[in-house]
Image (cartoon, rainbow, N blue to C red):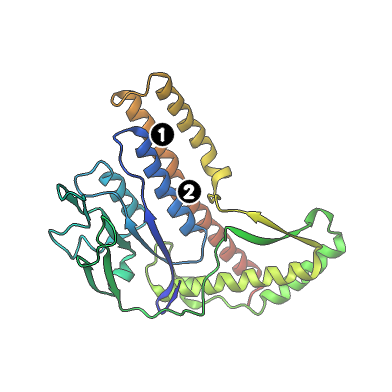
Amino acid sequence: MSTAIGPVFLGNVYMPSGNGDVASLKDYVATCAKIEALFSDCDAVYMIVAGDFNCNMHSRFYRLFQQFLNDNKLVCSDTSRLVDVFTYYRDDGSATSWIDHFTCSPVIDRHILQVVVMSDCLSSDHRPLSVLLAVSVDANRGFSNASAQAARVHYHWNSASPTDLAAYSNILNNELSSVNIPKSLLGCSFNCEHSCNREDLDNYYRDIMSCVTVSTDHTIRSSAGVYDNSHNVPGWSDVVAEKHTTAWAAFLDWVSLGKPRSGIHVLTLSWHYTTAVNTVREQVHRVLWRRWKAWRHHAFQRGAIW
């Protein structure tokens, strides 16, 4: 979603419910990891995740919910503004809870004018949250992400001749010479929170990739196809595979012991799954940052993009 403060990832969730077993904890952690993977796989700089989190301050998922907020630098906008409300009520009126939430990046939270529970809206056993944002949205402009069914062009680099590669290098150098590094990025750090700097980096990345695409289209033989990447997790093969194998082995051990509800094996299983998810969150960001630093250093050394 394109807004006046930059591209925003908007996710509506229905998180797994708690059944008192380890499997539900695993599903909750996996869903949190999938949300972050989707965010990492698009061009958004801010994040909104709202919906049924199946979690309140007294639920067994609350620790995982807080970890999700901390890992993604999100705030829970409804709990910081409302007191003594509920969003779920049992049909017989015997129980109520506050399990629906609106979470977002701090920059977006500062633009929120109002958060209310719509008590008069009786469409299900949930009462919807209404959030009023003072941010303009460009309905005619989106941001690129990996669609579930996307047309992909496959470039046959292995069959490119030396002449093709030389032509590619020449065209790419000419294209990059017209791209300027925004001054705001030269002193910017990885954890920069300035929306204008993030937007400059976003535009700079698009300009570079456009140069690469144009150069490749003109020189390298290609073929088109359609692929399904709806289940892609960025960095899986390079980063998470080993951790996933360890977590899966711990899960099989737990099953072989009769799926105990408590004890050292449950703690071990939870630790391994949490480790695998945290590996995705930490290492993928580090890889992207190292690539950006390497490219910036390379640009300074060559002077090819001024």
Instruction: State the residue lying farthest toward the front.
Output: 92
Instruction: State the residue lying farthest toward the left.
Output: 84
* Location of residue 60 in the rendering, given as x and y in whole percent from the top left corner: 25, 41
Q: Which residue is mark 1?
A: 272
- Looking at the image, which is closer to me, 10 or 37? 10
Count numbered badges in the picture: 2
Left or right: 51, with 146 as reference point: left
Left or right: 296, with 262 as reference point: right
Say if mark 2 contacts mark 1, CB within 8 Å: no
Name the residue: 80% across, 53% down: 158
* Location of residue 46 in the rendering, given as x and y in whole percent from the top left corner: 40, 66
**Which amino acid, mark 2?**
Gln
Residue 30 quadrant: top left
Name the residue: 61% across, 68% down: 299
Disc 1 is placed on an element classified as helix
Q: Quadrant of the C terminus?
A: bottom right
Q: Which residue is mark 2?
A: 283
Q: Give the answer, above or below, for where 61 lies relative to 85.
A: above
